[in-house]
Amino acid sequence: MKIAFFVNAFPMMSEAFIANSAAALIDHGHSVDIYGIGNVEPTGLSVKALVGHGLDKHTVNMRWPNSGTARFAGLPAALGTIARKNGIVSLTRLRPDIYRRSLVDLSAFYQASGFEGGGEYDILHCQFATLAESVIKHRKAGFLSGNIVVNFRGYDITETVEAVGPHVFDHVWPEAGSYIANCDYFRRKAIALGCPEDRIGVIGSGIRLENFPFSSPRLTKGEPLKFLMVGRLIERKGFHIAMRAIAQFQKQSSQRIKVDIVGNGPMREDLTSLASGLGIANAVNFHGACDHSEIASLIGQTDIFLAPSMTSAIGGQDAPVNTLKEAMAIGRPVIGTHHGGIPELVIEGETGALAKEGDVASLCEAIERLVLNRGDWPALTHRARKKVESMYALDTCTDQLIRHYEKSLHWASSRPLPQIVTS
């Protein structure tokens, strides 16, 4: 199959699952082009082993100026590129009745200039549902062709719905061939919004298990208890709740602690101040952004991995966190929250411990519970590894994705083709 991925930008350090999926599809004999259509600056490839796949040669990141004046100044060049790739008559496809506001803000011109003539694919995979609107418009205008598959991953099915309203994707339901959610929790949310129940499947974000070899957990007597958290430093990740819970645990147990935090984000300064206010600043180490090999190394050195996700003030929620899968794969005890899709992976007493989201006392109790039952860690971590293997092994998820594409194409063949603008 000839497949196009649509993302905000590629590569992004926090979106290794996009690179993993593209490379796996290529390994299975399919072709993949990646289009960054969000006018976002890429932050880099976190999976260095994928450099050999040459994904950069199949990636186009479409950028345009932020100011209206600069956009207008660059418009002749964008129009020239569109005409060169598609013929001058193709400029008549850029119609107001198709593009509406994206024609007014000129983004449609810059996006259309990035597609090769015809933009012909079997699958047009919108990796985030918020990108579907642009892909639908370009397909209607004839700059793209193919069956649209829309993914729900997190902010698109939570924050976007909270901000715009429950009808935000009403225009997508009749246009896309099928849909994917990365957890059952988001699948149910999509169906509640109007997504056709018979055309949405659950396919998790796969991980390369060979990069996260299992090793049995062990606590060294006399050493501090080591905690690790990985993610963007934003409210939804709940690191501020976890720091308070860890500080409370230390006070109650007199246990020495060490806390490693990986990631960047707007809460960095607040978290640094919080550590000082809690009296644990000397025990907290902020590492900033790290690639996958560095994260794997830090997981291997920790005792407990925390994924304390919580619903943010703007409605943001998480699926099963990728670094949570990686910690479970490596064999480290984990603590998650009753939040989003996390309980689909972390099962209390079976594959980890769970706490109420946004609740310091509950998270502290989960830490105490896990530490008190450290004799169960070998069995618990083996069960956790098996859980990740069964749900998120990259080959398994890739096979599921290919089957979903095939079903989507079969379904699309039985319905009328979308109307394409003719020039």
Image (cartoon, rainbow, N blue to C red):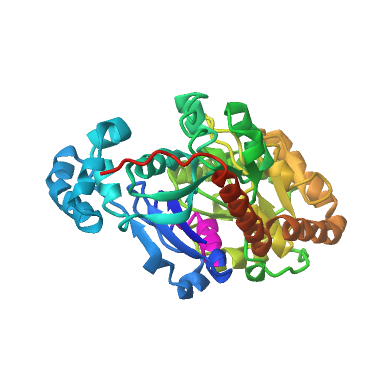
* Horizontal side, residue 214 vs residue 228: left or right: right
Q: Quadrant of residue 365?
A: top right
Residue drawn where x is 45% and y is 64% of the image? 45
Count the marks: 0
- In magenta, the rendered stretch is 12-23
On the image, the x and y values in percent for residue 308 come to 64, 43
Residue drawn where x is 58% and y is 40% of the image? 238
Identify the residue at the far bottom of this view. 52
Which residue is nearer to you in this view: 250 or 403?
403
On the image, the x and y values in percent for residue 91 come to 21, 45
User: With respect to residue 75, does 400 lie above or below?
Assistant: below
Residue drawn where x is 65% and y is 44% of the image? 201
Q: Quadrant of residue 184?
A: top right
Which residue is nearer to you in this view: 208 or 189?
189
Regarding residue 278, the answer to whether it shows in the image is: no
Residue 5 painted magenta: no
* Horizontal side, residue 408 vs residue 337: left or right: left
Which residue is nearer to you in this view: 142 or 186?
142
Regarding residue 174, the answer to whether it shows in the image is: yes
On the image, the x and y values in percent for residue 270 come to 47, 41
Which residue is nearer to you in this view: 405 or 308?
405
Residue 17 painted magenta: yes
User: With respect to residue 121, does 275 lie above or below?
Assistant: above
The secondary structure that most of the magenta stretch takes on is helix
On the image, the x and y values in percent for residue 338 come to 70, 37
